[in-house]
Image: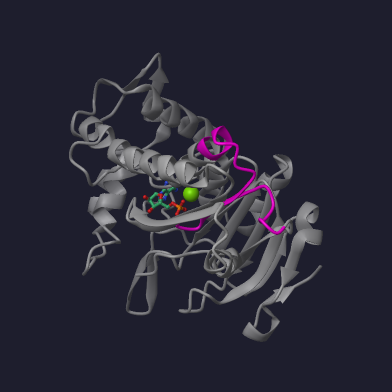
Amino acid sequence: MKNKLITVFFLINTLFLTSCSQKSEYTNNFFTMDTPMSITASGAYAKEAVTEAVLYINKLDGLFSKTLAQSEISMANERTGSAFSFSPTVFALIKKSVEYSNATEGAFDVTLGEITDLWNIKAKNPNIPSEEQINNALKKAGYKNIIADGNSVLFKTPCSLDMGGIVKGYAADGAKKILNDHNIKSGIINLGGNIYAKGKKADGSLWKIGIRDPRSNNENDIIGYVSLEDMAVVTSGDYQRYFEKEGVRYHHIIDPKTGYPSKSDIISSTIICSSSTMADAYSTAVFVMGKEKGIEFCKKNNIDYVLITKDKEVLVSDNIKNSFTFEGKEKGYTYEN
Ligand code: AMP
Ligand code: MG
């Protein structure tokens, strides 16, 4: 299973700066939400800021995890078919998720819990579910079957929530706020490839965020990078979690219409915008939409993207072409500026 996504130039830089023992810079590498993560900040209160942000993300995992029996999501999933009261944080993200589901006409859908359980991509020996199992699970899915109102969510059918497509983006936005509260001007939040680049690097230059080569086993191989500041960069790819059977790749991004891993012509979809929560939901959605619909959606909503197709074509939105540096030619990728 591949669990890492964007290769990050800044890591090299971070390590370098740390080894120069800049006292104001602090990094914490940690593991939560089933994902290796790291946060680096520069400033007088860097350590306090990073420590608080890590605690916050761990707390979110306790609320949203589908595998922790005591999480609010697990408890709600046990009792669907009626209304369930959530804490304000969980409720707010469910509500946001429904908004993104509407905006993406269901390409992003947080009610796929039963289907992702069936596929169980993270298992040691995952199996392909039967068509009957998928059809039964599909009947219970559908964002239109949940109504978020007040602080409770009404489940019109006994559907099951899976917030895995948005919670890391939400966590990055929360971590960014904590860094702001500690007056951090420069930092980098990397929650398993959900990146938020805060300000500029400590040396005053822009952050360079690498876009991973989706067909290389080496997580340091990139097809290019974007240079930016104060932006979220979030990638969804078919290489992040998958298994193969008889030459077919079964990955973790589900097409809500079919219940099967999306047969998209995109293999990596990166969204760049100021909200990490939105970037997370839309990177998943644009992957499912595929090249044509995905680009149309991004253009309509003024969303920046770096997409990689099955044909190894790299497509970048006009607005960020000047910030994108292509390095994929030798690896067989094509890019028309
Ligand atoms: P991401 O890596 O952000 O694209 O999210 C993929 C994760 O979100 C999967 O591991 C599932 O937990 C969940 N998921 C899969 N397909 C979808 C979908 N179409 N909409 C929303 N969440 C999804
Ligand atoms: Mg996502």
Reply yes or no: does residue 199 show up in magenta.
yes
Pinpoint residue 191: horizontal percent, then vertical percent. Answer: 46, 53
Residue for point 29% across, 43% down: 65
Note whether residue 321 is visible.
Answer: yes
Could you say which quadrant of the image residue 151 lies in? top left
Q: Which of 308 and 52 is in front in this view?
A: 52
Could you say which quadrant of the image residue 333 lies in? bottom right
Task: Please count the marks in the image.
Answer: 0
Quarter the N terminus occupies: bottom left
Quarter the C terminus occupies: bottom right
Residue for point 27% across, 45% down: 114
Residue for point 35% across, 38% down: 60
Task: Please state the extent of the stretch shown in magenta in the rendering.
Answer: 178-203
Above or below 7: residue 194: above
Above or below 199: residue 94: above
Pinpoint residue 19: horizontal percent, then vertical percent. Answer: 53, 69
Q: Which of 299 and 106 is in front in this view?
A: 299
Q: Which of 109 and 174 is in front in this view?
A: 174
Could you say which quadrant of the image residue 29 lies in? bottom left
Above or below 84: residue 329: below
Note whether residue 190 is visible.
Answer: no
